[in-house]
Amino acid sequence: MTEPRAAPPSRALPAEDGVPAAAGARLSPSAFGTVLFAIAAVPRLFVALFLAGEPVWDGHYYDFGARRIAQGFGYSDDLPLGGGGVVEWHPWCHYPVGYSAFIGFFYRVLGDSPRVVAAVDALTGAALAWVTWRLARRALTEGRARIAGLLVALHPGLILYAGLEMSEPLAALTTLGAFWVAAADARRTRGVILGSLLLGLSALVRPQALLCAPFLGLLLPIPYRSASSVARRLGTMLVACSVALVPVLPWTARNCRVMDGCALISTNAGWNLAIGAFPRATGRFETLHASDGCREVTGQVQQDRCWFEYGLAQIRAAPRHWLALVPKKLGYTFDHESFAVEYLHEARPASWPDDKRARFRAVTSTAHRLLVVLAALSLFARGRRKGSLVQGVLLALVLTLTYVACTGTPMFWPLVVLISAVPWMPLPGAPSWPPALLLPVALLGTTALTHAVFFGEDRYHLVATPVFCVLAASAFRRSVTGGRAATALATPPQASA
């Protein structure tokens, strides 16, 4: 059987896409990539080196885990056994290990100075801009792809995030990197396998990355023409999921061996489900207490299972209460962006008086909201002829949701839901949705779904911020011949050199 290959690279997609293919043509792709990395790195390094403080909130635990790993103790802490300073090594995995292991490597090699993690996080953010550009080139013109990369490089929220010892930039980098590796390989089967392996590594940073694995099967050019074609497509999705588990299983085996039970990656899923479902749930993070439901537990795995069962019981007992919280959860996740500012304030209170905090929160939230609105324009084609009525109704819906979001209490999450759902619909007059563009949409959709089920906080949308940047850069591109977005899945995407 012949190995499926991608379409041969072209220098650029057609200029009638709306943004000239020669935009920024004075720079070759390699030169632009270098410049883009520098543009992203400079402000992030400034924030990381001069604005960051001690790790706080979840960052404290990530940093503690990284130091233990760097010291050779593994992902663990020490428990006192009684008097005399006697302690016992105690493994743990409440948080995913990936980010702490990543930072721990650099602590081990370069020392555990705060400047080490600051530089690593800043360069991680710069690499995210570069990878976003590379992925966008698989589906958009060179000019549009460069816009996507620059949006990530200059996004104020992502720049401030360089001062936080948090896992979201690394999670976004590894997930989008998996998409790029899979889409860029000329041998599609090999690309899907390599992308799935990298997605498995990404899951060690953010377990929800596994939800994106089935979508890698879209990269294989299997037309939707018969039941056998559908079966083949489902088979590729199953293979991608299986391969993505390969990097995870050694960590699972470790947990089974040293913990009080088996845990796939971490032990916070039950905790998070309970937070999103128990009687005191508000839609965002709330601290659980033993009095809420799990009084007698002896280990992390047992505790996680107890809270998971408790959360399911609460959903079964009061499903309307749980469903009524979904809009609030999505609102807390997508309606604003303030976590980076509040983290920096918590770390260095004297440097962030109330008026400064308010100004920076306004800047980051405004940038995020504007990006969401621009991303919604990716749903529309340029120069469309067929499907004008359907596209007109969709445009009216987007404009109405934007008006409502901007004139009252900010409510941008309905736009996010629309952006996550519409690309999968075969609407007349829709723009092209090649797999390399649908994969980021899958990341956005799985992010929204995850936090609709559990709970929401604005930091969780940072993983999908590069997706908004790619979609914003793709607004009003060409329509698909024949007017059906689903046809894009049957053929390989064009690639720019």
Image: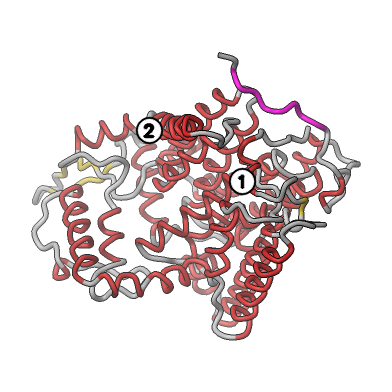
Q: Amino acid at mark 2?
A: Leu
Q: Mark 1 — residue?
A: 486
Q: Quadrant of the N terminus?
A: top right
Residue at 58 percent across and 85 percent down: it is 408
Q: Residues within 10 Å of mark 2 (few under 14, many from 20)?
A: many
Residue drawn 51% across the image and 31% down it: 229
Answer whether residue 4 is magenta in the image. Answer: yes
Looking at the picture, does residue 359 appear above or below residue 21?
below
Q: Residue furthest right?
A: 26
Indicate left or right for 57 with 290 as reference: right
Residue 151, relative to residue 399: is it above or below? above
Q: Secondary structure at mark 1?
A: helix
Rendering coords of residue 44 (x, y %)? 64, 54
What residue is shown with label 2?
A: 245
Question: Quick one: SS at disc 2?
Answer: loop
What amino acid type is highlighted by mark number 1? Ala
Q: Quadrant of residue 90?
A: top left
- Quarter of the image for residue 387 reads bottom right
Magenta stretch in the rendered image: 3-10
